[in-house]
Amino acid sequence: MHVEVRGLNKKFGSFQAVQDVNFSITKGQLIGLLGPSGGGKTSILRMLAGLESVDSGDIIFHGQRVNDLPPQERGIGFVFQNYALFKHMSVADNIAFGLEVKKWSKAKIKDRVAELVELTGLKGFEKRLPHQLSGGQRQRVAFARALAPEPQLLLLDEPFAAIDAKIRQELRTWLRDMIDRLGITSIFVTHDQDEAIEVADEIMIINKGRLEQKGSPWEIYKDPQTPFVASFIGESTIVEDVTSLRGFAIDGLKAGTKALIRPEYVEIGSRNEFIVLSATEQGRVHHIHFRGSEWLVEVDVGNTRLVTYRSLEKDVLHPGDVVQVLIHRAYLFNDNESWVMENKLKEDPLPVFI
């Protein structure tokens, strides 16, 4: 199903939950709605589903305006955060419920339930009640029930939030594989960046009811279009005055310009680890954190504390160690825009020993 949203607005009392949101989704895509709690993600999802009315704007499925259609006529499946399974019904009966409401024949229902039990890895659990299942299994039942009526659009509201970390990771992979096999257009709400980046074809960043940016995970990470996106995606440090850092004090850049610096754009080490010392400055290790495959290092450069990664294969650093710090690039921003700037001293042809 091709989805198009034009000028979507929603208020709850005086609170503007969704403000002038516009986007389109290509058939078969898996889209992640990502943003902070209370940003408007679930309100958008519920309006798409028909569970909330639209104050203004248009929701269009396959060229048809659906604002006034009830949920059961929109061709959607909805997976809730808390599963919303019928506690007194077996797995098979939960999956079949919507089909019985639609008055499918018993034979067709039986075949569809068997197909979905196989698809979702629930074979052998058909007669169990929800309380006899693990969290991951209950969520699979919720997926199967949503898919049973053969919807054209699947909507998922924080589908993994109630599941422990290990099972959540497994379900992410399973969901991605399942949607690839089915080719169903899908939108899921999450506040988990890793989840959105790992699973989604495209991410829509929602903040204060507005769509900040839409694009692939890589596009959003490497080229954030707004200060909020730059600060929201990935681990980072906000620097209040980037002109205080070596390689970023250039003509035309106003003192006090803010910057966001990500760990992978900072390199630290001893003097002999750098060829071009003109682009580095002195720092002092504040703290180190073991991350399994690498060290996460906090380092103070003047009054600024930066965060970076360091390979386990290099010499181990300790709090208090004096190191050289090379900032390769930074995201600069003001109230209206953000842009990337490379360290202007990094390409010096000759080393300058400081």
Image: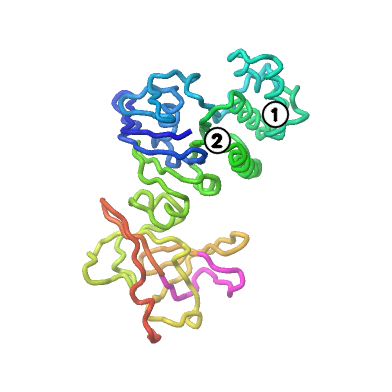
Q: What secondary structure is found at the residue carrying circle 2?
A: loop
Where is residue 285 drawn, in percent x and y? 48, 69
Q: Which mark is residue 184?
A: 2
Labelled pair 1, 2 in contact (Cβ < 8 Å): no
Q: Which mark is residue 307?
A: none
Q: Residue furthest right?
A: 124
Where is residue 229 drawn, in percent x and y? 38, 49
Label 1 amino acid? Glu
Residue to which mark 1 is pinned: 115
- Number of numbered discs visible in the structure rendering: 2
Q: Where does the magenta region start and end?
A: 309-327
Q: Is residue 97 above or below residue 146?
A: above
Where is residue 332 drawn, in percent x and y? 32, 60
Q: Is residue 53 above or below residue 240?
A: above
Where is residue 167 drawn, in percent x and y? 65, 41
Cα–Cα gap, marks 1 and 2: 16 Å
Q: Nearer the viewer, residue 248 or 61?
A: 61
Q: How is this picture coloured?
A: rainbow
> Residue at coordinates 34% horizontally, 39% vertically from top-left?
210
Label 2 amino acid? Ile
Crowd rating for badge 1 (residues with CA inside 10 Å; few <14, some 14–19, many 20+):
some
Left or right of 100 on screen, residue 326 = left
Which of marks 2 and 1 precedes in the sequence?
Answer: 1
> Residue at coordinates 55% horizontally, 27% vertically from top-left?
151
> Residue at coordinates 75% horizontally, 28% vertically from top-left?
125
Question: Is residue 273 in the magenta section?
Answer: no
* Quadrant of res 204: top left
